[in-house]
Image: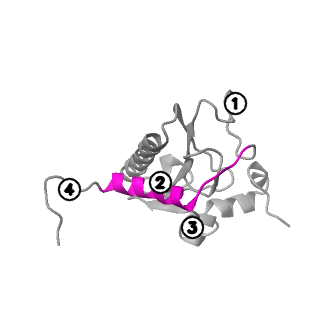
Amino acid sequence: MAEPLGGALWRTPKAWALRRSRTGCPICRRRHPRDVVATLPASWVTAPRQAPLPGYVAVVAKQHVVEPFELPPSAGRAFWNDVMLVAKCVAELFSPVKMNYELHGNTVPHLHVHIYPRYRDDPYVGGPIDPRRATFARSREELLRIGRVIRNARSPRRRGRSPRR
């Protein structure tokens, strides 16, 4: 029988407590999330092939916490710096009219932020994003490009110096 999703899991306190723990967390059990395209100081950036919108990514904390306030102050700053860096890269790559940020953890209670670039003609105009309603397929090349742009933004080349040989 399939495990209940989202809030349904909350109705089983033992199962929910296990899922909230590091040992029961699917991300921690794998030691990383699926579909990683970039690794940053405090997080992983994920981008699945099927996405609700072009440019969609999620930023997943490396440290297992459920709520952002559970991060120590320096780790919290590092995580939000990663989120802002990723959002800026996605905005520059995809030129959306607006960026949306969602933080839930109702199914996978491991801190992560969904970043949705919004477009004038996206299928969710006037309503919430429902990933079940529309799916955009992304090529391997597009996913590699997203990861490359994020990694390059994190470690810009030294200016004014010749490369080491």
Give above or below for 8 relative to 129: below
- Residue type (three-letter) at the residue carrying disc 3: Cys
Q: Amino acid at mark 2?
A: Ile
- Tags 3 and 4 touching, CB below 8 Å: no
Query: Residue 158: which numbered mark, if any?
Result: 4
Q: How many residues crowd mark 1 within 10 Å: few (<14), some (14–19), many (20+)?
A: few
Q: Which residues are magenta?
A: 134-155
Which residue type carries mark 1? Gly
Q: Earlier in the sequence, mark 1 or mark 2?
A: 1
Image depth: mark 3 or mark 1 in front: 1
> What main secondary structure does the magenta stretch of the protein show?
helix
Residue 121: within the magenta?
no
Compared with 81, 35 (above or below) is below
**Distance CA(mark 1)–CA(mark 4):** 44 Å
Q: Residues under labels 4 and 2: Cα distance?
A: 21 Å
Q: Residues at badges 1 and 2 in contact (C-beta under 8 Å)?
A: no
Question: Can residue 152 be seen here?
Answer: yes
